[in-house]
Each structure stands twice: as C-alpha cells, then as structure tokens.
Image: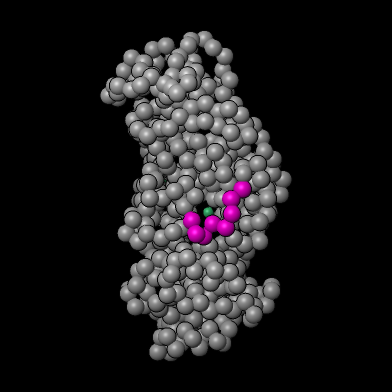
Amino acid sequence: MVRCDLADGARDVLVGEAVVVNERREDRDGEREHAEQRDPGLDPFPHEGPHGAEANGQSRACQRTPGGFANAGPVRKRRPRWTCTIGAEDEAPMPNAAVLLAPRELRLEVRPRAALAHADVRARVRRAGVCGTDVAIYRGDYRVPLPRVLGHEWSGEVIEVARRDDETWLGRRVTAEINRHCAARGEAALCPLCARALPTHCATRAVTGIVGADGAFAEEIVVPAGTLVALPESLDDDAAVLVEPFAAALQVFALSPVAPGELVVVLGAGRLGALIALVAERLGARVVAVGRGRTRQRLAPFGVPVELADVAARIVPDDPLAAAPSALLERVRALSDGVGADLVVEATGRAEGLATALDLVRPRGTVALKSTPGRPVARFDLTRAVVNEVRLQGSRCGSFAEALAFLERHPLPLDALIEASFPLAEAGRALDEAALGGKFVLECG
Ligand SMILES: [Zn+2]
Ligand SMILES: [Zn+2]
C-alpha cells in the first residue's frame, strides 16, 4: 500500500503513468488544505479499486496498491509536490454527516465510508441546499425510513470512482440528479418505466437524501456516476445547489408549455414559485406572482417585470388561498379579457391552493400542480375542472442538463435566493430556520 504525504509546496508526483493528486485534511473542524484539482483526468483520491480501502473503512486519501493505480491518462510533466511512502498508517478522518435518527432528532456523526457499488462515485460535498422536502422529512410530515442523511441539492467534487470508465469525473465540480434509476445505476436491464423513457419514475429508483440513499448533509456523498452533471464555471458552489429546484421549475413548462404573451399566475411565490415565475418571464409570458411579504424581496435582484399580488392580508391562517381574493381575481381577469389565466401554477404547498387555481384559470387552460402537501384536498370542486375542460398537470423533477442549458441562455443570479449559510454542524438550526421560510445552504466542505 502506498501512502502519500504532502510535501511543502508539493501537489503531485508522477507514479508510472499516473499522476497522483491529493489533499490533506488538517482537522475535522473545517480547517483543511486542498490541493487544487483542475484537470478532470487526474485522480485526486487514488484508490485500490471499486471496493478498495476507501470502501472498507480504512480510507486514506492517497492509498493505492503498488501496481494498481490505473489512471493511464497522458503523463504530465509537473513540478513534484507530493512524496509517497509505502506502509504508513491510515489516518484520513472519516467524514461527518448530519443523520436524521427520528423526526427532529438530528445528530452529527462520524460515519465509516460506505462501499461504492460498481457504478458509484464518491464526492466531497461543498454546499448542500436545505429544501422544503428536507424540512418536511425533518418534521415528520413526510415519512421516510430513518435513519437517513438528508439533502438532495448539492455541489461538490468527485474524489473517487468505482469504474475505470468514470475516471474522467475525478476532480470535477458536479452536482447530481436525485433519481437513481436503472440506467444511472448501471443495471443491465431496464425496468418497464425506464424502458418507456420515464427514468424519473423508475420502478426501482432510490432518491438521494429521501428514499433508499443517503444525501448531501455530509462531508461526502456517494451517488451513481450516471446521475452526475458537471457544473460550469459560471455557476458557483452556492448557486449550484439551486440547479435541482430550478430543473423542477423548468419541468412545469416542459409539461405545460407557454407561448410568449400568455398569462401565467404563480400561486405561492416561495423559493420554487419564484423560480417558476422567473422562468415564465424569461419564456416571454406575462406573469403574476402571488405571494406573501417576502416575495417582492426575493424577486427584486432579478429585475424582471413580474407583477406581484401580495395577498398576505387576506389569508386565513389555516386555509390559505382557499378562494381567490377578489382583487386578485379582478386583476387576472383584467389582464386576460375577462377569461382567466392561460396557466396557473399551484405552488402554495397547501392542498387548498387548487381551489384558487381553478378560480383563476381560463377554460381549457392548465393548472400546473407543484405542491406536495401530503394530505387530500378537502374541498375540491371537480365539476368546475370538467365543465371548463381544465387540464391538471402535475410535475416533479426536471432535467439538470436542460436547467444548465437554460441558465446559459438566460443567466440568473440564482444565489440571490439564498438567505444564509450554516456550517454542517448546524444542520438542525438550518432546518429550523428553513421551516420558517427562506432558502438556506449548508457549508459542508
Ligand atoms: Zn429540493
Ligand atoms: Zn428503472
């Protein structure tokens, strides 16, 4: 076994045909020195193979078998920055993770590194976004098997791969799609839903940080290589955590397209609703965003002409937006020759929002459903939807690649939506704050 020690000013050393690039961690409290890793072809965490030392809990960042380091990329002439010795002790600290043991019972734990499955990669998490789904699971409203490491919105850097084919990911800044479907997991045969090109509905999927797979409220995360998405330089680590919700916002329009000039009403302009409103505006729609006090503040940095209808004063606490306030109804009618909105996006997070949406949509218009309140709609007049031939379209996750392409065409300062960041050790506080509203990010590494 080879051990690499950082030499002063050193970064890498040529070993055979391989270039070893490494890092060291000074302590567990966040003071670390990272060797910069710019070339995606290099291996920042040389390892013994798919199930090597990293996998069995004996991890050391720079371990390798004497002849086993298989990165056969082009040899680069570099100033040697590392020295390697054989047989030294393993001492890389195990990664910390915020583990949800039971509702509202979150504990920071040092966890042994999980083994990589044959198509997995390990990434060092830099930032993780706290999402409404995380809050719902944390509070026990959304029940999933526990314990679980939450967090599905993240940015980080790939540090280990199981397959030689995935070595090009090493050292790259990435995020990852959250649905771990058949193809992403490297399965030889696809399930019937994946075979029908519906991978986000994969019959055997796990969902990062939610069901069947631990998430990103941790210093390291393991994901299938097939879920990885490389991040462009234009998106910093903070903004990158918003790729997942941004993709979810785009999915509304993938399933319910709008034409320029059409009227879109977004009910519930929280963070997701704000993203939906921004996308609609960029697509050329006229947008009315219906939200509460902070909506204006949330959308201000984007400088888009989104009309805001602040209905806070009219909301009954336990029955928000149960019926469209008359001022809103009048405004939407005034903007639509009296017929109603072409598309109403229901993103209030409450079951009652659907009734309001049906008040506002035009005949043969679309109500796009984005809320997942987890309980039945108590009062819902199906007749209105039938008589007006309204299309009800649910939508969930969107394509990260399409989200990044959209952001390339329409740059948006996504990180303006982030209100504050917390260290990983304060994940519980971040979840409590997020429960009160707002977007927060964990600094994981
Ligand atoms: Zn989310
Ligand atoms: Zn599948």
Placement of the C terminus among the 4 image quadrants? top right
Image location of residue 112, percent across then percent down: 60, 28
Image location of residue 79, percent across then percent down: 35, 21
> Image point 66% across, 75% down: which residue?
319
Left or right of residue 16, residue 414 in this image: right
Q: Report the front residue among 11 and 356.
A: 11
> Image point 59% across, 35% down: which residue?
30
Image location of residue 373, percent across then percent down: 60, 63
Q: Quadrant of residue 95?
A: top right
Give the magenta range.
415-422
Q: Quadrant of residue 432?
A: bottom right
> Image point 44% across, 53% down: which residue?
243
Image location of residue 187, percent across then percent down: 40, 36
373 is higher (above) or lower (below) than 296: above
Residue at the front extreme of this rendering: 9
Residue 19 visible in the picture? yes
Q: In the rendered structure, does residue 420 fall within the stretch colored magenta?
A: yes
Left or right of residue 77, residue 37 in this image: right
